[in-house]
Amino acid sequence: MPKDHTSSAPRRVLRLRRESQGFIIGSFLFGLAATRVYGDAVGPELDNITYFVGSLFFTIAGFVQLSLSGRPVPGAESHRIERYDWWAALIQFVGTLLFNVSTAVALIQGLNVEQDRVWGWSPDLFGSTAFLVASGLAVVATTDTDKLWDPHARNWRSTWLNMIGSVAFGVSAIAAFIVPGTDALENAAIADLGTFVGAVCFLVAALLMRPPHPRYSPNQASTRS
């Protein structure tokens, strides 16, 4: 869930582009893997690999975002927006690591249903919760920067798209709970739909926040962003 950082340094802009690209690729792969057509076409193993690779791109983008946030100095001089931005980036990065775990478990062979529920579903739920908390912190920071309702602000639209996506991921995680004593999900259709909707929201948010390449002038960039 990329944030709108302002800096004229080309190197920083390139890192922001990598952050955005990581979220774009990760979101695309999650959305693709969540579609029944793709899953039926490639089979469960390749579908799970798609999820796992997507989670790696999320983690790479989350790490770039965290490194760009820069931990604020404690004390009165630390602005609330800076603190909320940093905590949002940190919690989201932890969430991406948890998604690494949950998607990796899906690739491991030989797990019984109970093991899969404990080792796969739990980090998926906590990862979704981390995304939701991070989105909430980002909303607070955006409200301080712009205002609570400003649909014309690019940062505002991206932040709220991330919030909707995080809610959708949370619904998906709950629906993906494996019913004890069976190998069936609580609601497979809702689980897939929640993942797909969340991925689309994250994808659009990342596209909105993707900065123009630094070699372009502001006038050129406005036509390409």
Image: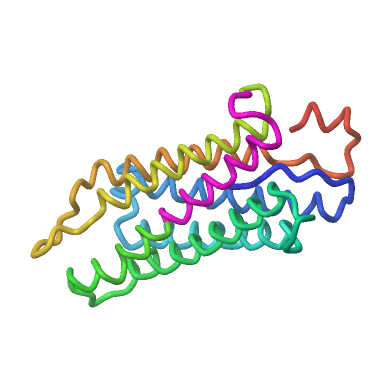
User: Does 135 appear in magenta?
Assistant: yes
Q: Position of residue 216 (x, y in %)?
A: 88, 38
User: Colour scheme in the image?
Assistant: rainbow
Q: Foreground: 72 or 175?
A: 72
Point 88% across, 27% down: residue:
219
Q: Is 111 left, or right, of 209 in this rendering?
A: left
Point 29% across, 46% down: residue:
191
Q: Is residue 66 above or below residue 119?
A: above
Point 67% across, 37% down: residue:
144
Range covered by the magenta-colored residues: 128-150
Q: Foreground: 35 or 90?
A: 90
- Quadrant of the image for the C terminus? top right
Give the image quarter of residue 101: bottom left
Most extreme residue toward the bottom, as rendered? Answer: 110
Q: Is 169 left, or right, of 155 in this rendering?
A: left
User: Does 50 appear in magenta?
Assistant: no
Point 26% across, 70% down: residue:
118
Q: Main secondary structure of the magenta part?
A: helix
